[in-house]
Amino acid sequence: MNTSTARPWLVALLAWAAIIFTLSSIPNPPGPRVTELRSILAHLVEYAIFGFLALNVIARTRGAASLRVAFAAWLLTVAYGISDEVHQAFVPNRHASLLDVAVDAAGGALGVVASAHWLRHRLPAAQPISRTAARPGPGSRRSAR
């Protein structure tokens, strides 16, 4: 576990979460709404960045990235997206939307996948991204015979 390399990524993730929260706190002005396509693209980008940062934090803290770690980063991203929609339900002229949560989840998945590809070339060779983390078990020992 190397928390020193994860610390800058954690600061970036928390800062990004604060930016999302701040943008979600701005009431929509009365009048024409933002187009649906523009809103979808904004959510995709916001949560792709969140997913990218989340995987970097978790993978660097654990020392390696596996599918389990990637799934945890994606779940963190989706959970934050849900909390953001709940928050928006209390902001004037904003509303919670299941479509937004779905788009947040898709954006988070894109960010996690991009981060996994990026980390594949950044983590030390002894700690590659793999489908499963190496688990010591009874079958891992060799017989003396």
Image (tube, rainbow, N blue to C red):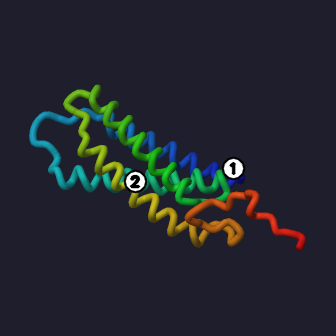
Q: Are marks 1 and 2 in contact (CB under 8 Å)?
A: no
**Does 129 appear above or below 103?**
below
Provide residue 87's location: percent of width, then percent of height.
Answer: 34, 31
Where is residue 21? Give x, y as percent.
39, 37
Q: Amino acid at mark 1?
A: Thr
Q: Residue 17 sits in which quadrant?
A: top left
State the residue position of label 2.
108
Per the image, label 2 sits on a secondary structure element best described as helix
Gap in angstroms between the C-alphas marked 1 and 2: 23 Å
Of residues 138 and 114, the one drawn nearer to the viewer in this rendering = 138
**Residue 101 vertical position relative to residue 142 in the rendered view, above or below:** above
Earlier sequence position, callout 1 versus callout 2: 1
In this image, 77 relative to 67: left or right? Answer: left
Residue at 49% x, 62% y is: 115
Point 51% across, 56% down: residue: 70
Q: In this rendered view, identify the residue nearer to me: 21 or 62.
A: 62
Q: Nearer the viewer, residue 114 or 18?
A: 114
Label 1 CA crowd tier, 10 Å (few <14, some 14–19, many 20+) = some
In the figure, 127 relative to 29: above or below? below
Q: Residue 65's image quarter?
A: bottom right
Point out residue 107 in the picture as x, y percentages from the top left corner: 35, 55
Crowd tier of the residue under label 2, counting other residues whose Cα lies within 10 Å: few below 14, some 14–19, many 20 or above: many
Look at 45% across and 46% down and name the residue there: 75
Amino acid found under the numbered disc labelled 2: Gly
Q: Which residue is mark 1?
A: 3
Judged from the image, the secondary structure of the residue bearing numbered disc 1 is helix
Between disc 1 and disc 2, the foreground one is 2
